[in-house]
Image (cartoon, helix red, strand yellow):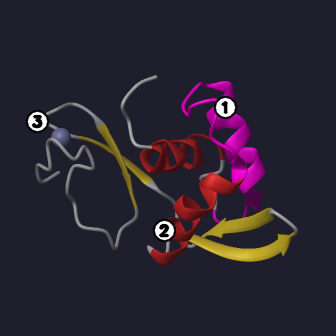
Amino acid sequence: MNNIPIITNIRKIIFENFNDIDLRFNNDQIFEILKQNEMVDPSVTIDNMEVYFKELCDTEILRNIAQNFTTQWFKLFEPIEKIQCGSCKKESYLISSESRTCQNSSCGSTL
Ligand SMILES: [Zn+2]
């Protein structure tokens, strides 16, 4: 396990797989990619993920467009940008309205 927060990995997965405002994608698809790439602990369930998707909706990165039992469908409001931090070299995945601050919590440099 790496120590990248799950929320950062979700942003990365969206950037790499679904970074198109016309695409629909869902929480199950993202969770599968997280598991395949061992970005989450095997004990984590889809229910544990709900808080992260809620946070991404609250940040207005994701728009919840439909729900079918535990499957939540999303669209992006705008494409996500990948910005590499000049200080720690880690990548942040941000939308235009977010502050340009490195998302590596032990860094926090201005991007
Ligand atoms: Zn940094």
Q: CA distance from mark 3 to mark 2?
A: 26 Å
Numbered range of the magenta stretch: 21-46
| Mark number, residue 19 | none
- The amino acid marked with disc number 1 is Lys
Residue corresponding to mark 3: 87
- The amino acid marked with disc number 2 is Glu
Which callout, 1 or 3, points at the residue further toward the start of the chain?
1
Which callout, 3 or 2, points at the residue further toward the start of the chain?
2
* Magenta stretch contains residue 42: yes
Q: Is mark 1 within 8 Å of ligand 1?
A: no
Q: Is residue 52 left or right of residue 102?
A: right
Name which quarter of the figure residue 84 lies in: top left
Which callout, 2 or 1, points at the residue further toward the start of the chain?
1
Residue corresponding to mark 1: 35
Name which quarter of the figure residue 31 lies in: top right
Is the Cβ of the residue at disc 2 closer than 8 Å to that at disc 1?
A: no
- For label 1, count other residues whose C-alpha is less than 10 Å away and answer few (under 14), some (14-19) or many (20+): some
| Mark number, residue 55 | 2
What residue is at 22 percent from the left and 60 percent from the top?
100
Ligand 1 found in image quarter: top left
What residue is at 25 percent from the left and 43 percent from the top?
104
- For label 3, count other residues whose C-alpha is less than 10 Å away and answer few (under 14), some (14-19) or many (20+): few
> Camera-side residue: 50 or 18?
50
Q: Is mark 3 within 8 Å of ligand 1?
A: yes
- For label 2, count other residues whose C-alpha is less than 10 Å away and answer few (under 14), some (14-19) or many (20+): few
Q: CA distance from mark 2 to mark 1?
A: 20 Å
Name which quarter of the figure residue 87 lies in: top left
